[in-house]
């Protein structure tokens, strides 16, 4: 049977909140499992925490005074519960966690900072994106100061070991808590974690050991890159502090739009127009590709919307490591152009043709029209051979 909460905390029933809080603090320090190694300490601590959670809350305390444990057994209590008045376990140990756990994490020696990354945008043509190109880029970055060699000290002088942290880059403070002596570790404020100070800073770099310079770099852009792709060049960003790695350069590729070609994944799209005679009788035509013109046979009776596939004339496929493999195809979309202006001779020929073909209009059987066929192709159905 649960003990009386007032008895657990060792206070009178009429005790005020301050008396209850002081009693709880005292007992929590005494019975916390990290301090008290008695096998029963954990259960006692849970009981203390449960009693405080109820008695520190006005509403819960009122129900407990009237109905006893039955009035507060619907969720009150348990290790880690939070009282409304003092805050339970979290508040009693707030100082402990701030000064030991949290401060220790923040106070770990920062050490030399690595160099920052740099970014530059580079614009290439559609063809360069297909085949790849070695591009020279110019950008600014932080480099080692030639005057001091990167140590930040004026020539003829040297950095010296920090007297406050003895070269460790961190300082330690011992604080007394109810759990015993706790060590707080923080970055040395004198040397800012470097472990050394510079009595006579370099006049060129003002003691930083680095200077901003404009540099040129050759960057290999692989074939198959798409607009917006980022290429990481490791070790080509800003120089880090002494002993720290250099940052990276990120090259963002921008691809110019082409006058004729469009890209869809690894395929290249080209729209062409043929006249009605070529469509009706068939023809051999030359169409442009990124590799040069190729001959394409147009069968007799070709309709608008016909798609021809030129295999291997598309964009190289790009692996995650930046290497290319294989190539997509070029898809040639045909549009049959109906002339809007005719010479007298052309009009006469079309009139003769019209007489031989008749003028009756016949309804077409239900089926997919041109627009439907285009939508099917874009969704992957009825793809061209």
Image (spheres, helix red, strand yellow):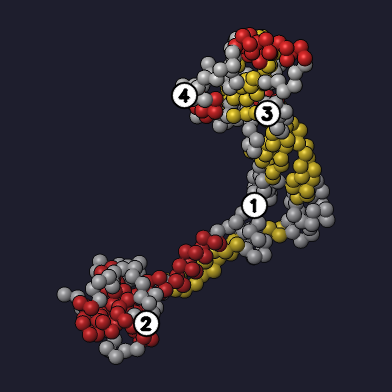
> Furthest-left residue in view?
1
In the rendered structure, which disc, 1 or 3, sits on the residue that comes first in sequence?
A: 1
Q: Nearer the viewer, mark 1 or mark 4?
A: 4
**Could you say where residue 7 lies in the image, as x and y percent from the top left?**
24, 83
The structure residue drawn at horizontal position 64% and vertical position 21%, both measured from the top left corner, is 335
In the rendered structure, which disc, 2 or 1, sits on the residue that comes first in sequence?
A: 2
> What is the secondary structure assignment of the residue under circle 3?
helix
| Above or below: residue 152 compared with residue 382 | below
Q: Quadrant of residue 195?
A: bottom right
- Image quadrant holding the N terminus, namely bottom left
Q: Quadrant of residue 322?
A: top right
| Above or below: residue 88 compared with residue 114 | below
The structure residue drawn at horizontal position 71% and vertical position 33%, both measured from the top left corner, is 256
Residue in the foreground of this view, choosing between 370 and 352: 352
Number of numbered callouts drawn: 4
Position of 153 compared to 175: left or right?
Answer: right
Separation of disc 2 and disc 1 at Cα? 46 Å
Badge 1: residue crowd in 10 Å (few <14, some 14–19, many ≥20): some
| Above or below: residue 181 compared with residue 18 | above
Q: Nearer the viewer, mark 3 or mark 4?
A: 4
Residue in the foreground of this view, choosing between 246 and 350: 350
> Disc 3 vs disc 2: Cβ atoms closer than 8 Å?
no
User: Which residue is under mark 1?
Assistant: 113
Position of 94 compared to 53: left or right?
Answer: right
User: Which residue is under mark 3?
Assistant: 129
Separation of disc 3 and disc 4 at Cα? 40 Å
User: Which residue is under mark 2?
Assistant: 21
Badge 3: residue crowd in 10 Å (few <14, some 14–19, many ≥20): many
Badge 4: residue crowd in 10 Å (few <14, some 14–19, many ≥20): few
In the rendered structure, which disc, 2 or 4, sits on the residue that comes first in sequence?
A: 2
**Could you say where residue 321 lies in the image, as x and y percent from the top left?**
57, 31
User: Which residue is under mark 4?
Assistant: 367
């Amino acid at each position: 049977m649960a003990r009386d909460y007032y008895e657990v905390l060792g206070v009178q029933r009429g005790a005020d909140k301050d008396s209850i809080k002081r009693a709880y603090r005292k007992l929590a320090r005494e019975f916390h499992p990290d301090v008290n190694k008695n096998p029963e300490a954990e259960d006692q601590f849970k009981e203390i925490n449960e009693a405080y959670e109820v008695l520190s809350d006005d509403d819960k305390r009122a129900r407990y005074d009237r109905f006893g444990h039955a009035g507060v057994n619907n969720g009150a209590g348990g290790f880690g519960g939070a009282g409304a008045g003092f805050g339970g376990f979290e508040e009693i140990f707030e100082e402990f966690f701030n000064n030991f756990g949290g401060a220790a994490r923040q106070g770990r020696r920062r050490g030399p900072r690595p160099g920052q990354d740099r970014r530059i945008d580079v614009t290439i043509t559609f063809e360069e994106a297909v085949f790849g190109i070695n591009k020279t880029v110019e950008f600014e970055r932080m480099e080692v100061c030639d005057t001091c060699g990167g140590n930040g000290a004026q020539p003829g002088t040297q950095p010296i070991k920090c007297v406050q942290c003895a070269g460790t880059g961190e300082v330690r403070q011992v604080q007394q808590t109810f759990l015993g002596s706790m060590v707080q570790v923080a970055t040395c404020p004198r040397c800012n974690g470097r472990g050394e100070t510079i009595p006579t800073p370099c006049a060129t770099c003002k003691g930083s050991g680095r200077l901003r310079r404009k540099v040129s770099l050759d960057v290999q852009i692989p074939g198959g890159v798409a607009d917006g792709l980022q290429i990481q060049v490791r070790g080509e960003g800003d120089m880090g502090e002494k002993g720290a790695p250099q940052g990276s350069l990120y090259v963002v590729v921008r691809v110019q739009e082409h006058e004729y070609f469009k890209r869809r994944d690894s395929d290249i799209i080209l729209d062409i127009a043929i006249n009605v005679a070529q469509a009706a009788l068939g023809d051999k035509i030359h169409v442009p590709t990124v590799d040069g013109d190729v001959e394409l046979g147009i069968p007799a009776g070709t309709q608008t919307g016909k798609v021809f596939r030129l295999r291997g004339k598309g964009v190289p496929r790009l692996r995650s490591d930046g290497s290319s493999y294989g190539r997509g195809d070029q898809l040639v979309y045909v549009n049959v152009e109906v002339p809007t202006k005719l010479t007298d001779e052309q009009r006469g020929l079309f009139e003769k043709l019209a007489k031989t073909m008749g003028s009756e209009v016949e309804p077409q059987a239900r089926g997919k029209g041109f627009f439907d066929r285009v939508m099917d192709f874009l969704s992957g159905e009825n793809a061209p051979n």
